[in-house]
Image (tube, helix red, strand yellow):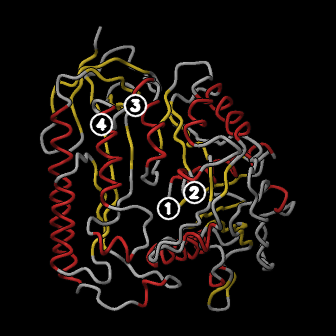
Amino acid sequence: MKRASFHTLGCRLNQADSALLASDLSAAGYEIVPWGEEADVLVINSCAVTAVASQKSRQAVTSARKAHPNAYLVVCGCAATDSQLLSGKGALLADLLLPNPKPKSLAALLPENPRHEEHSAIAPIPPIPHCEGFTIPGVGLYPERTRANLKVQDGCSFRCTYCIVPSVRGPARSRDLDDIVREARALLEQGYRELVLTGVNVATYRQGDADLATVFERLLELPGDFRLRMGSVEPGPLLDRVIDIMAQDKRMCRFLHLPLQNGDAGILRRMARRYTLEEYARTVNYAAEKVSGICLGTDIMVGFPGEDDGAFKRCYDYLSGLPLSLMHVFCYSPRPGTPAATWPGRPQGDVAKERMDALLELAADKARAFAASQVGERVRVLLETGEPLVHGWSDNYLKVVLPAMSGLDQNTFHECRIAGVLPGTEREVAGEIIK
């Protein structure tokens, strides 16, 4: 039997894409093996969201070719338009480049005998046309996991000034709603207990009269004991209906990740974000009021061109006043091909790092405060590990550690009470099984 292995860089959407390609190869008779094992076909799903991510993608390709010189190496994803991935220093790196959108069948593009002594490069496969209401055959393959990613949307048309994604993913487009439900049903029948809805900009989902809230309503009609979690989503008033559904149905995880990017109005405008600070705060506060115990996450970028001491202080103060539970903080990195990459006024490296450290400390304080607020609360935990080391995740995104006992098997739900925050952690808590 031919063997294939996948290495995925970047976002949750890339994970979903890899799972669908793996499912296609599995259906074609390939055995899917862990990355690093000998395989006939190696697939690297690349990332190009930052210059650093592009560099890591190139490094992954170079390392894979060196470690497996005779394997057929496929590079797909956001960095697959990089011609450097096809050859380097006179030696062939990738055998096949697959830019976005990814093909519906990878198996159909592979040679009958993919493992060979001499490789001959072919031209990159042209991307398939961007298609509104697109469908994806098959069902994502997620070995040894309790949750599965469910792709509902792809692409983005917003063109924030720091972001390359619209250029490498294409415009926003939505997956056919019936096709979403079809894959979700199949994933649940395979035993996954949590489905995570993912895309580039899922807030823009539209299929006729259906929007993102409609997607959740349709999925909640499926039978079975499961829960739904939403991946990162752009903030805005259209989320109100999703939040209302979350407040009404316990199968909806109490979690929203709303990327803010910056808490200063001037910087936000320079980033060309599609909301004001007032609108963002309204969405966050609405969620906090409607859904008790909700975990609210965000992304924050420091060091953007034009960020002076005053802008950073306004950002810090704004974040301090929001009921956030989880903050992902990172320094701005210029991405060639984006408008902001050529702008002057970037803070010096040591200044940006100092500001990032301050926000990381604020983030840690907020995470600990949220975990502490849940002590004594009842939560439903999906176990990721069984005996003897037992832990899982609550619907509001706390890692819950349980005492080892019989019957605590992987991929099972358990009603628990949060007993306390584990020392030295921010989001790990001790749990007690409710009999």
The residue type indicated by label 3 comes to: Thr
Question: Mark 4 belongs to which amino acid?
Answer: Leu
Q: Residues within 10 Å of mark 3 (few under 14, many from 20)?
A: some
Cα gap from disc 4 to disc 1, whole angstroms: 23 Å
State the residue position of label 2: 14
Cα distance between the residues tagged 3 and 2:
24 Å
Q: Which residue is mark 4?
A: 398
CB under 8 Å between callouts 4 and 1? Answer: no
Q: Is residue 395 above or below residue 332?
A: above
Label 1 close to label 2 by CB (< 8 Å): yes
x, y percentage for residue 380?
A: 36, 23
Dot 3 or dot 2: first in sequence order is 2
Q: CA distance from mark 3 to mark 4?
A: 15 Å
Question: What residue is drawn where x is 67% and y is 91%?
Answer: 90
Under tag 1, what secondary structure?
loop
Residue positioned most to the left: 423
Disc on the earlier residue, 1 or 3:
1
The image quadrant of residue 78 is bottom right
Report the Cα–Cα distance between label 4 and label 2.
24 Å
- The residue singled out by tag 1 in the image is 10
Q: Is residue 218 above or below residue 346?
A: above
Question: Which is nearer the N-term, disc 3 or disc 4?
Answer: 3
For label 3, the residue is: 385
Q: Earlier in the sequence, mark 4 or mark 2?
A: 2
